[in-house]
Image (cartoon, helix red, strand yellow):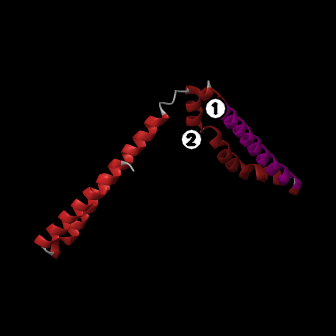
């Protein structure tokens, strides 16, 4: 067992005992403030432990080499930029295109929507292929 884990419960116990002793001395009217103070100390310790563990895990992983093109592509995809723009634009354009296509009746409207779905489907396949290739390149560079 990790020796750090053995000392922490005794620290918490000491803090709790001090809070209880203070409550006895000050009386029940200060109970709420004492509990809040005790909980904030526990919360601060837990935050520090979590930050320490995250830092240790990140240190174990080591520094990630910079891959500029991968990071730039990810930045382009975020929000409504890059590939995220196409579905929004196609939905906006779907309204007037449906009106134009419906002038030819039901077959025209169906052709319009099949075109919209086809364009979005092709874009999604292209994005998946690009992401798969990116993962493959990343895996290869990590083994090299």
Residue under numbered circle 1: 139
Does residue 103 appear anywhere in the picture?
no
Does residue 140 appear anywhere in the picture?
yes
Q: Residue placed at 40% from the left, 45% from the top?
A: 53
For discs 1 and 2, the disc positioned in front in the rendered view:
1
Name the spot of residue 109 as percent of width and height, x first: 83, 53
- Residue 125 highlighted magenta (yes or no): yes
Of helix, strand and loop, which one carries label 2? loop
The residue closer to the viewer here, 117 or 52, is 52
Of helix, strand and loop, which one carries label 1? helix
The residue closer to the viewer here, 131 or 62, is 62
Residue under numbered circle 2: 78
Q: Residue placed at 19% from the left, 69% from the top?
A: 20
**In this picture, which residue range is highlighted in magenta?**
107-136
* Image position of 21 with respect to 61: above or below: below
The residue closer to the viewer here, 112 or 30, is 30
């Amino acid at each position: 067992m990790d020796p750090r884990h053995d000392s922490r419960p005794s620290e918490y116990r000491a803090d709790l005992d001090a809070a209880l002793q203070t409550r006895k001395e000050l009386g029940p009217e200060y109970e709420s403030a004492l509990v809040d103070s005790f909980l904030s100390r526990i919360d601060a310790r837990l935050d520090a432990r979590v930050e320490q563990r995250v830092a240790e895990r990140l240190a174990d992983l080591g520094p990630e080499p910079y891959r500029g093109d991968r990071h730039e592509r990810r930045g382009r995809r975020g929000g409504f930029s890059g590939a995220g723009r196409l579905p929004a634009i196609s939905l906006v354009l779907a309204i007037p295109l449906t009106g134009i296509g419906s002038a030819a009746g039901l077959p025209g409207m169906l052709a319009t929507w099949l075109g919209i779905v086809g364009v979005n489907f092709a874009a999604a396949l292209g994005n998946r292929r690009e992401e798969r290739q990116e993962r493959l390149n990343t895996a290869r560079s990590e083994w090299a």
